[in-house]
Amino acid sequence: MGWLQLQIYQKQNWIPCENQITSIDDFLLSNWLERLYFDRLERKSQIIKETIEGDISSEVPATYLQNHQNTTFVLDNEAGGALTRNKTSWLVKPSVWNEELKSKAIVWLCEKTNKSILKLTDKDYNDNSMSSLLAEQGKSYNLNIEMFNKLQHTITGWPGGKPNSDDLKRPERSTPAKKRVLIFSPHPDDDVVAMGGTFIRLVDQGHEVHVAYQTNGSMAVHDEDVLNRLSFMEQFNDIFNLGSSNVEALSDRAKSFFQTKGSSSIDLEEIRDIKSLIRKRVKKVVLPESLIILDKEQVLIKKLLEFPSIIQDASDQYSPAILANFIYDLVKNYNNYYQSTPILTASSEDKINFRLALSIKVGEIIKTGMALLGCSVPKQM
C-alpha cells in the first residue's frame, strides 16, 4: 500500500497527491489509499474535526473521505484536539475520572449549561453523559464545592507567592520570598496589555522582573513614527544650523523603502535601529493610586500626544497655519486649566508633581512649536 500525505485547507478544493487523480470519485475508489498522515497540525484541529465528524460538503472537500472504505487518519494530540473523542471523551465512551478529566468536564458543563459551578444540579450531570461521575463522587453539591475551591485556590493577589504563609493551597510557593521572574511576551506590548496588573504586583512586591520579547521590538513602533522623528530631526537641524544632509538622505531612503514595503518585508537595518531607539525612549508611567486625572488634564494630555502628527501634517501640506492653530488651541486649553485648577497648592504631593510635570511639558511643546514657526517665546508673561 502506498502513503499519501494530504494537506487540508479550509474551503479550498486542493488535494495534492503522488498519483494522478481526476475526480473525487476516483479518489474515493482508489484501492491504494490506506492512510492519511497529518503531521503536527496544531492549528488545523478544527478543520480536521469538520473533516472527520462534520457533514459531507464541497466546502471542505476532504469530508468525502468519510465515504472511503479504507481510510485511517493518523493524528497527534494537537491535531486531534478538537475531536469529540478527545475534547469531550465522556460523551462517546466510558471514562476513568482522574482529577484532570473531572476538572475539564465540570468546566465544560458550566459552559454548556451557561451556569456557574455552584448552580449545577444532578440533572445537569445526568443529561450530559456525566452520570458515571456522580456515581463515583456522590451528589452534585459535593462535586461543585470541590471544583469551586480548586479554582478559587488558583486566584491570588500574590502572583510571586506570599511570604511567611501556608502555601499548600496557593498557586505559587512562598519561599524564597523574593524571586527572579521572567515574563515571555509574544509582542512588545502584550506584557502590559495582557498582564499589566500581574506585572505591577510582581514589581511592587519586590521581585526581580525581566521581560523577554519573542519578536523584534521594532514591531511596536509604526513606520509613521520613524518618518515623524526623521522629519523632526531635519527641521531641528535646520533651525539650529547643525547640518541635515545625512538626516535628509536617511529620510529619503526610509520613505522609498516604506512605499514598496510588503506585509512580510523586513525593515532595513538602519530603520530597525531607529525603531529600537524610539522603543527604548518610551516610558511606561504608573500613576499613584491616589491621583485622579481631571477631565481638563485628559484634554491636555491628548492634545500633547497630537503634536508629532501636527508637525507632519503641516510639513506635508506646506501649511504653517496647521501648527499655529494647534498651538493656539493648546494655549487656550492650558489657560482654562490654569485658571480653574490649583497647581502648587494642590491637596497632595502627587498632584503637585503631576500638575507641574504637565505644565512643564505644555511649555516645552509651545516653545518647540513657536520655534518651528520662527517665533521667539518670552520667558515670563
Image: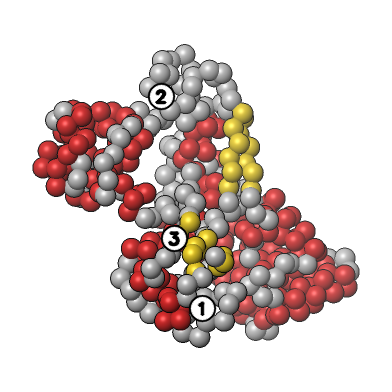
Residue labelled with disc 1: 14
The number of numbered badges drawn on the structure is 3
Could you tell whether 86 is left or right of 211 in the image?
left
Residue ID at (82%, 71%)? 250
Quarter holding the N terminus? bottom right
Q: Position of residue 149 (x, y in %)?
A: 28, 28
Q: Amino acid at mark 2?
A: Arg
Residue 279 versus residue 95 in the image, above or below: below
* Observer-nearest of 124 and 219: 124
Other-residue count near label 3 (Cα within 10 Å), few / some / many at <14 / 14–19 / ≥20: some
- Cα separation, mark 1 vs mark 3, equals 20 Å
SS at badge 2:
loop
Q: Amino acid at mark 1?
A: Trp
Residue ID at (66%, 75%)? 262
Residue labelled with disc 2: 170
Foreground mark, 1 or 2?
Answer: 1
Residue labelled with disc 3: 72
Other-residue count near label 1 (Cα within 10 Å), few / some / many at <14 / 14–19 / ≥20: some
* Observer-nearest of 222 and 380: 222
Other-residue count near label 2 (Cα within 10 Å), few / some / many at <14 / 14–19 / ≥20: some
Could you tell whether 355 is left or right of 72 in the image?
right
- Cα separation, mark 1 vs mark 2, equals 51 Å
SS at badge 1:
loop
Quarter holding the C terminus? bottom right
